[in-house]
Amino acid sequence: MIKNVVFDIGNVLINFKPFEFLRERFADEAVVQAVYSTIFESKEWPELDRGTITEEQATENFCRYCSEYEEEIRKVMREWHSMLTPIEATVDIFKELKQKGYKIYVLSNYHMKAFESTYNNNEFFKLADGMVVSHRINMLKPEPEIYDFLLKEYSLNAQETLFIDDTLANVEGANKAGIETIFFKSAEALREKLKGLKLL
């Protein structure tokens, strides 16, 4: 029987659509592609999630890698948190599950500054019974250790725990830890699956 529901954040509870964000700011597709690659496909990006580098350090590295677009890179790094807006239909599910008496947790790869902004701007996070955020513990999904940390930190039984994530590797990592999972595709599909499991 499921007693605990664990949500990923990015593209499950909160929008993260960097291409849309970049195209709203730069008309030149070459700029969009170059800046996207330099920032969001960098080796620094997951290290920001892991908490082993600061945004300031990463920004300097990005500008060094792609000096011709330094101005654009700095603009993006100043403003990218603004794309982190709530996915209201999933937030509604989060709240409904809490109201039904399930314990609600968050397990996410997330940068320190971005998480602070996201948490402070979205009251619903305060309903969570616990949160494991990558930068705080220097671990990343889908590393096995992060799932073990979640279970031990909150004394959760894996077989009573359901994890929802939009990245297949992260879902598979949770499965290996014995946790039940739903591969997130949309809020509507999630609601149907939860109804099928008699959780909603």
Image: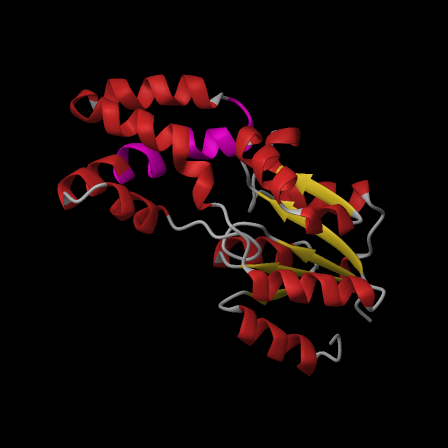
Magenta-drawn stretch, dominant element (helix, strand or loop): helix
Q: Residue at x 46, y 35 (%)?
A: 46
Among the 4 quarters of the image, the one containing residue 65: top left
**Residue 62 in view here:** yes
Queried whether the magenta region covers residue 41, the answer comes back as yes
In the rendered structure, which segment of residues is drawn in magenta?
36-52
- What residue is shown at x 42% (from left), y 17% (from top)? 57
In which quarter of the view is residue 136 placed?
top right
Q: Is residue 72 left or right of residue 157?
A: left
In the rendered structure, the answer to whether residue 50 lies left or right of residue 4 reads left
Specify the quadrant that holds the C terminus. Answer: bottom right
Instruction: List the single residue furthest toward the bottom.
Output: 196
- Is the image coloured rainbow, by chain, by secondary structure, or in one colour? secondary structure
Q: Residue at x 14, y 41 (%)?
A: 30
Q: Is residue 180 visible?
A: no
* Residue 5 in the image: above or below residue 129: below
Q: Is residue 17 above or below residue 64?
A: below
Image-based side of 173 in relation to 93, left or right: left
Instruction: Classify the position of the N terminus by image quarter.
Output: bottom right
- Find out whether residue 90 is within the magenta segment: no
User: In the figure, is residue 106 to the left or right of 39?
Assistant: right
User: x%, y% of residue 134?
Assistant: 60, 36
Indicate the position of residue 4 as horizontal and vertical percent values. Answer: 78, 60
Compared to residue 190, the image places residue 104 above or below, namely: above
Q: Position of residue 68 (x, y in %)?
A: 16, 23
Give 109 or 18, whichever is nearer the viewer.
18
